[in-house]
């Protein structure tokens, strides 16, 4: 399977290579799928592909970054169209289910989440709350801003994974403190990678029935 290895620079300064990189990724994925035509395209299949294709750590960083860029782009596009912000889509554009969005896709791929925060999100709230700073807005968007409520509310529980790659060092401990006796922290699972596992589902059902997931 070495011929399916993807290895192309995808740093922020090489966004022009995204088409070539995406093609190498899809070629590797489709080549792997052709060897497993009876497989369902579910989380188990993706894990099998990850294990057998054995992407490098750099490739994984690039793939995660690309997945986040896609999610970010969809959010930016949706808010732009809904609020007629004239950011990516012209404010007077009337889109239908058959409208081409190719040009918007090209612009969206070059629009980072930081661009969205600085040019759309923060100015929107600054117009409503003139005294707020960018740092204050970011702080108020975090769980910490309602930490006291989360600590005292027994109707809210937490399920998370200790190896979630988007967490910063020490944040698992903060989450445990924020949900005392109501946090189920699993050792493995990455970012939402084990939500369908039997033990996880049992914990969810137990919480909704009893209101007290077993802390682990």
Image (spheres, rainbow, N blue to C red):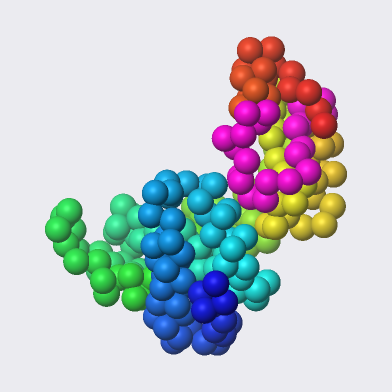
Q: Quadrant of residue 63?
A: bottom right
Quadrant holding the C terminus: top right
In the depicted structure, whether residue 145 falls above or below residue 74: above
- Please indicate, yes or no, whether residue 110 appears anywhere in the rendered image: no
Q: Residue at x 62, y 41 (%)?
A: 194
SS assignment for the magenta stretch, majority: loop
Q: Is residue 86 left or right of residue 159?
A: left
Q: Nearer the viewer, residue 53 or 86?
A: 53
Decide which of 37, 192 is in the foreground and name it. 37
Q: How many marks?
A: 0
In this view, 191 is above or below 92: above
Residue 70 falls inside the magenta stretch? no
For the N terminus, the image quarter is: bottom right
Q: Position of residue 184 (x, y in %)?
A: 75, 32
Nearer-the-camera pick, 152 or 5: 5
Range of the magenta residues?
Answer: 180-200
Q: Residue at x 70, y 33 (%)?
A: 158
Residue 53 position within the rendered picture, expressed as x and y whole percent measured from the top left? 57, 67
Residue 181, visible in the rendered structure = yes
């Amino acid at each position: 399977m070495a011929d399916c290895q993807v290895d192309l620079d995808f740093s922020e300064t090489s966004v022009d290579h995204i088409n070539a990189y995406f093609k190498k990724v899809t070629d590797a994925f489709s080549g792997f799928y052709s060897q497993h035509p009876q497989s369902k395209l579910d989380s188990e299949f993706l894990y099998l592909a990850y294990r057998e294709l054995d992407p490098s750590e750099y490739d994984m960083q690039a793939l995660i970054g690309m997945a986040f860029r896609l999610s970010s782009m969809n959010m930016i596009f949706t808010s732009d169209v809904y609020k007629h912000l004239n950011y990516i889509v012209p404010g007077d554009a009337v889109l239908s289910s058959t409208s081409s969005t190719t040009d918007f896709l090209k612009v969206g791929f070059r629009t980072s989440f930081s661009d969205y925060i600085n040019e759309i999100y923060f100015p929107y709230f600054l117009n409503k709350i003139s005294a707020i700073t960018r740092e204050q807005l970011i702080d108020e968007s975090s769980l910490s801003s309602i930490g006291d409520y989360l600590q005292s509310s027994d109707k809210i529980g937490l399920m998370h994974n200790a190896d979630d790659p988007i967490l910063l060092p020490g944040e698992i401990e903060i989450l445990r403190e924020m949900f005392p006796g109501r946090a189920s922290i699993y050792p493995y699972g990455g970012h939402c990678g084990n939500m369908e596992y039997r033990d996880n589902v049992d914990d969810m059902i137990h919480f909704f029935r009893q209101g007290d997931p077993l802390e682990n």
